[in-house]
Every structure is written in structure tokens, then in C-alpha cells.
Image: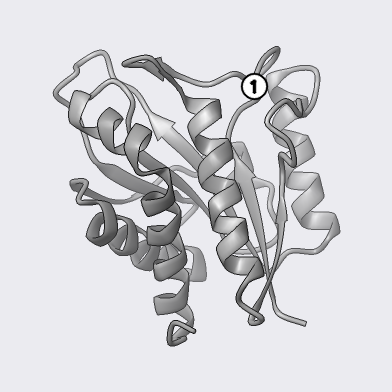
């Protein structure tokens, strides 16, 4: 049995808990496809087992923001996953703000070290700005998971250059996360 990675594609396609929008892109569409690409890479690697929070582009989790987040966490906890990766896209009222950041519950933890590797993997692969690993103990999916958990903000939908990368190279973002996982575990690419 491989290392169990739970990939949470942030937000629902419609209804409760939809995501940000910018430059004609919807967060929930980007997170879905990046998660699928990442799952495909992990499934092709016998060192990993993988599950997704959203198994189809139309799947809706929960009936409110709270129950949507709880469904994701409960699926990871009950498996149980070894690691939890929540994928998101960022937005800001200032269109100049750009880059990639990864959120964790606290410093000097496995989550924090994993976040450093994943952040570097994404930045090196797609060329976004490195905004660092950031603490956010208030995030439900980081607070309620029973395993090391990270929340990856891939890039800013509201920034023209970031939005182009998200639109044109979702595979690259997935590959960046995968490369970060390999680096964190000290694995060579297959």
C-alpha cells in the first residue's frame, strides 16, 4: 500500500461554497482539473494511493459552506489519509497582486515542511512568484484534519499573468505539486 494522499479540489461547481472568479476563470473549475491531473500522476506512481474530494466536475459536497468543508475533512479522516492537500486559486481586489502561497496550521510541522517543498515545486514548474508558506490556523480544512495538511493557493485569478498560467497550464500546476511531493519524500521521479 502506498502513501495515501487526499486531494481536495477547493469549492463546489455551483450551489454552496463556490469559489472566486477573475479574468473569465472560475476557481472551482481550475481546482477540479488540477486535482484530476495530480491524481492521475499519483495513480501512475505505485508509491502513492490517492482519493479526490470531487470525483466529477458537477459533484457538489454539502449544503452549506460548513457542511461542504466538513464533507472534505470527513472523507480524508475516515479513509484515513496520510496527507491532505487542498487546492485553491486566490483573488484580490488589487489586480497587481500575484503569486503562489501555501497555508498551514502551524510552523515546524510535517505540514510546514511539505508546504515548503510543494511551494518550490509549483514556482519552479510554472514560474509564479514565491509568496512563501503562511500560517492560517483558522482554516477549517487545516484545523480539523487528522493528518499533515496544506492548502495550496495556486495563483491569482484576478492577476492577468497568473490567470493565463492557470488557464493555459493547469497540468503544470499539478506537476509542480507532484514534484514537491517527490522532493518532500526524497523520491526520485519514475
111 up-or-down from 9: above or below: below
Q: Which of 142 and 82 is in front in this view?
A: 82
- How many badges with numbers are in the image? 1
Q: Name the residue under label 1.
A: 13
For numbered disc 1, what is the local secondary structure? Answer: loop
Colour scheme of the rendered structure: one colour
Q: Nearer the viewer, residue 103 or 60?
A: 60
Q: Which of 72 and 35 is in front in this view?
A: 35
Answer left or right for 30 relative to 162. right
Residue beneath the point at 65% across and 25% down:
12
Which x, y percent locates residue 106?
Answer: 46, 56
Q: Which residue lies furthest to the front in this view?
A: 168
Please state, as top left, top right, bottom left or bottom right, where the N terminus lies in the image: bottom right
75 up-or-down from 60: above or below: below
Answer left or right for 157 relative to 149. left
Residue 74 visible: yes
Residue beneath the point at 37% across and 14% down:
24
Name the quadrant containing residue 147.
bottom right
Which x, y percent locates residue 177?
Answer: 43, 59
Residue beneath the point at 71% across and 39% down:
54
Residue beneath the point at 78% across and 27% down:
67
- Characterize the local packing of mark 1: few (<14), some (14-19) or many (20 or more) Cα atoms within 10 angstroms: many
Name the quadrant containing residue 25.
top left
Residue 139 visible: no
Which x, y percent locates residue 122?
Answer: 32, 56
52 up-or-down from 117: above or below: above
Which x, y percent locates residue 157?
Answer: 33, 25
Amino acid at each position: 500500500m502506498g502513501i495515501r494522499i487526499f486531494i481536495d479540489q477547493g469549492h463546489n461547481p455551483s450551489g454552496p461554497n463556490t469559489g472566486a472568479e477573475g479574468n473569465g476563470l472560475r476557481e472551482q473549475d481550475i481546482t477540479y482539473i488540477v486535482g484530476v491531473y495530480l491524481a492521475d500522476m499519483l495513480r501512475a506512481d505505485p508509491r502513492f494511493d490517492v482519493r479526490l474530494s470531487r470525483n466529477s466536475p458537477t459533484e457538489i459536497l454539502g449544503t452549506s459552506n460548513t457542511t461542504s468543508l466538513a464533507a472534505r475533512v470527513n472523507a480524508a479522516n475516515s479513509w484515513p489519509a496520510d496527507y491532505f492537500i487542498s487546492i485553491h486559486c486566490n483573488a484580490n481586489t488589487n489586480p497587481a497582486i500575484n503569486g503562489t502561497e501555501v497555508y498551514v496550521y502551524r510552523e515546524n510541522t510535517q505540514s510546514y515542511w511539505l508546504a515548503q517543498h510543494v511551494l518550490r515545486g509549483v514556482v519552479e514548474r510554472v514560474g509564479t512568484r514565491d509568496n512563501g508558506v503562511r500560517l492560517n490556523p483558522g482554516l477549517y480544512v487545516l484545523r480539523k484534519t487528522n493528518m499533515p495538511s496544506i492548502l495550496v493557493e495556486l495563483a491569482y485569478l484576478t492577476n492577468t499573468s497568473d490567470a493565463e498560467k492557470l488557464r493555459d497550464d493547469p497540468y503544470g500546476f499539478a506537476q509542480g505539486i507532484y514534484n514537491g511531493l517527490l522532493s518532500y519524500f526524497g523520491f526520485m521521479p519514475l
